[in-house]
Image (spheres, rainbow, N blue to C red):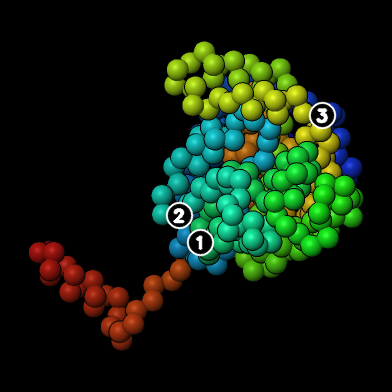
Amino acid sequence: MEYENFLVSPGKSVDLNQYDPAFVEKGISKKDGKKRMKKNRKAIAGLQDKFYAYDRYSLLLVFQALDAAGKDSTVKHVLRRIRPQGINFVDFLPPSKEERQHDFLWRIHRQTPKRGMINVFHRSYYEDVTATRVHPEYILEQKLPEIGKTEDINDAFWTKRFRQINDFEQMLTENGTVIIKFFLNVSEAKQSQRFLKRLRRDDKHWKFSEKDIKEQELRPQYLEVYEKAINHTATGEAPWYIIPADRKWYMRYLVSEIILNTMQKLDISYPVLSLESQKEPAEIKSELNKKAGK
């Protein structure tokens, strides 16, 4: 399957400069990609209905990316047909004062999906090993033991966090949560074009911040910390996929393929009819037919 080419194998050393953000599979047009995505979207919705009723697994979709990569629009287009009661969208803002008084995974665990549910993480606990690594002053706000200044935040600190993330994800998967992690890989040129679009359109102004431009200047640092995070946390149980994000139609198609194929591998089914009373189904049908005037 084409999407498997974007799967990061556990133990593989990732170099994001080797991934083309504008890549498109040969032989697939924009029209074809959109058509396939819509077909996948319908199939995902059908599987989610069974997934919700089966009530044994949960699905966690983690989306990480640089600004303007297309996280919002991808979620909107791929998952729009899922019944509202079966999905939660969680947007992780900077931690509150209360959240900073706990370990960095405390607020995350509270938002993981219950059985039968799909939860989408728009950014996630990976901010605590990426954004905080570019801006180590954020770590100081967490008042951790033995961390009094940024110079105290060394490689051993980050290695420990990666281990904690791996342990956390293993615990979730062992308890029925299926995890898929997406890094939407956008080029600097395409990111700049999307920032310009936000400036030009009144209905996009709310999405623009000058901080985005300042953060864009730190792109090399962000790519480096993402490489380290992916390298340390790509596992068979909680895989990473590096998705080319310059062409949104292709990005959405790939994400829909991965989600659909992951769900199709699960052994799920609709529960059999269970009646608390001793009545036979035929007897209940007969009573309902009388009430319905049949």
Above or below — where is 261 with respect to 173?
Answer: above
The residue carrying pointer 1 sits among few (fewer than 14), some (14 to 19) or many (20 or more) residues within 10 Å by Cα, namely many
Q: Earlier in the sequence, mark 3 or mark 1?
A: 1
- The quadrant of the picture occupied by the C terminus is bottom left
The residue carrying pointer 2 sits among few (fewer than 14), some (14 to 19) or many (20 or more) residues within 10 Å by Cα, namely some
Element marked by disc 3: helix
Residue in front for this viewpoint, 13 or 156: 156
**Alpha-carbon distance for marks 2 and 3?**
38 Å
Farthest top residue? 200
Q: Which residue is mark 3?
A: 220
Identify which amino acid the numbered label 3 is placed on: Pro
Which residue is located at x 86 percent, y 39 percent? Answer: 14
Q: Is residue 87 left or right of residue 209?
A: left
Please state which of the two labelled residues, at mark 3 or mark 1, is closer to the viewer: 3
**Alpha-carbon distance for marks 2 and 1?**
7 Å
Q: Which residue is mark 1?
A: 116
Above or below — where is 47 with respect to 77?
Answer: below
Disc assigned to residue 86: 2
**Alpha-carbon distance for marks 3 and 1?**
39 Å
Which residue is located at x 13 percent, y 64 percent? Answer: 292
- The quadrant of the picture occupied by the N terminus is top right
Element marked by disc 2: helix
Residue 110, position as x, y percentages in the image: 56, 61
Q: Are marks 2 and 1 in contact (CB under 8 Å)?
A: yes
Identify which amino acid the numbered label 2 is placed on: Gly
The residue carrying pointer 3 sits among few (fewer than 14), some (14 to 19) or many (20 or more) residues within 10 Å by Cα, namely few
Q: Are marks 2 and 3 in contact (CB under 8 Å)?
A: no
Which residue is located at x 53 percent, y 63 percent? Answer: 114
Residue 6, position as x, y percentages in the image: 76, 38
Residue in front for this viewpoint, 33 or 177: 177
Element marked by disc 1: loop
Please state which of the two labelled residues, at mark 2 or mark 3, is closer to the viewer: 3
